[in-house]
Structures are given as C-alpha cells and as structure tokens.
Image (tube, rainbow, N blue to C red):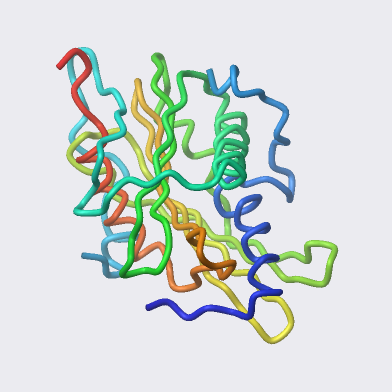
Amino acid sequence: MPKQPATSAALLVLSAVLCVAVTGCGGGRASAESSASARGDGDSSAVAGGSAVSGESSGNGWTLTTPGSVDGLARVQPSAAKMAKLTQALDQTTAELGITGSSVEAVYDDPSQGGYLVFAGLNGSGYDPSTLKRMAQVPDTRQDGTGDRITQDWQSTTAGDHGGQAGCQETMLQSGGLAALSSSCLWLTPTTFGLVTYYPNSASDHFLTNTPASVVAPLMRKVRDAVEQRAGS
C-alpha cells in the first residue's frame, strides 16, 4: 500500500498534481483555455530502457472505448467534482499538444493501491505522435509560490503493441517535511490520445504517493490493451 501524507498536505498535493503531473501547466506550460467542446509488471527498465515507438498501427487506426473493467479492476463513477477535475486536466493537456477530438474518460477502482486508476483521452484523426515530445523536458525544480517545491521529469517508455509514442511525466512535490511522488503516462497515435494516472478514492482525501513511472508505465500499456480497439471493429 502506498504511503500517505497527512490530510492537510495531501489536498495540496492533489491540487498540484492535477495541475502539474497530469496537465503540465505552470513553468511556461500552456494555460487551460480550451473548453470541453475543444477537447473536441513494472521495473525501472520498463520505463527508460525501451524505444518510444513500437508496432505502428495500420488501416484505419485505433479508437478508444470505456470497458466495464480493466486488468481486473471494476469501473466506478466518482463524484461530479472529481470528474470535473479530470476533465479540466484533459483539457489542459490536449491544449498543450494542440489536438482536439471526442473525449473519453473512465475511472476504475484499485483496492490494492487504495485509490482510483484514471484513464482519459481523445478519439480523433490526423494526430502526429511526434508532438508528444512537447511534454518532454529536462529535470526541472521550482517553487510554486506557496513555499512548496516541485520537481518534474519526463521519461520515454515503450508504447506497446498498438504503436505510436509514449512517455511518463513524474512529479515530486515537497511540502514542509512531506514529499509525494506521482506519475502520469501518456500515449499518442494518429487517431488516439490517452493518459493514465492514479487519484485518491472518494473515501479519502489522501494522495497516493508511491506511483512512480516504473509503476504507471506498464499499467498504461495494460490499459491500452483494454480500452483501445481497431477502428471499425
């Protein structure tokens, strides 16, 4: 079970990761001005050791779905407030990448992690997988203006059998004597964009701190296998 910080700091961590780890806002990132209509296994070698491109798709490409379960985890319906934060995070990320499409969002309960496995993405066309490199950056550390220290890093990872490009943004937030590490892993093909991360569940305000890229990257590939289907199939 991931370690959890005290509740007061955890709320701060959740806010920062929604803005930084998932969306990449702040520090010269694009602001969230797009509307909903404009959205239109794991060891460290699994993250950094492989090629960012594999198994390019053919034909009509891929399409995203929201199955009732993913990797044995049941789909759940969080509160409207939590879903609104997820939608905002998706809007900001796709704005930075300059892509639009039909949004797809689903949340799955993961009791082993004590939280939600979150999947969000777009179905569209004409995407250039190489634009995912816009999310890449050298390790960056800064103060967020409230006394908290944020360190970000980007790691390429294997995209999986469905092809495209993939990577993970790992964020460390230090608040006083507490530190939280969280990751979001993303992929992009010519017809789909997706991201996978963890959020706390509705029964707790704590933030999951033990979700490094080495954990989330292989999970992202499992999620892709479940939610991404051949277009027209």
Q: Residue at x 62, y 61 (%)?
A: 14
The quarter of the rendered structure image containing the C terminus is top left
Disc count in the image? 0
**Pick the front one: 118 or 74:** 74
Residue 46 screen position, x and y as percent: 26, 61
Can you name the residue that lies furthest to the bottom here? 177
Residue at the (70%, 34%) spot, across then down: 32
Q: 92 or 159: nearer the eye? A: 92
Q: Tell which of 201 and 178 is nearer to you.
A: 201
Left or right: 166 as drawn, with respect to 183: left
- Residue found at x 39% / y 51%: 156
Quarter location, residue 62? top left
| 102 is higher (above) or lower (below) than 137 | above
Where does the N terminus fall, quadrant-wise?
bottom left
Q: Is residue 183 left or right of residue 173?
A: left
Q: Position of residue 12 (x, y in %)?
A: 70, 65
Position of 17 compared to 54: left or right?
Answer: right
Q: Position of residue 125 (x, y in %)?
A: 39, 14
Q: In x, y percent, where is residue 163?
A: 24, 34
- Give residue 47's quadrant in the image: bottom left
Residue sitting farthest toward the left: 233
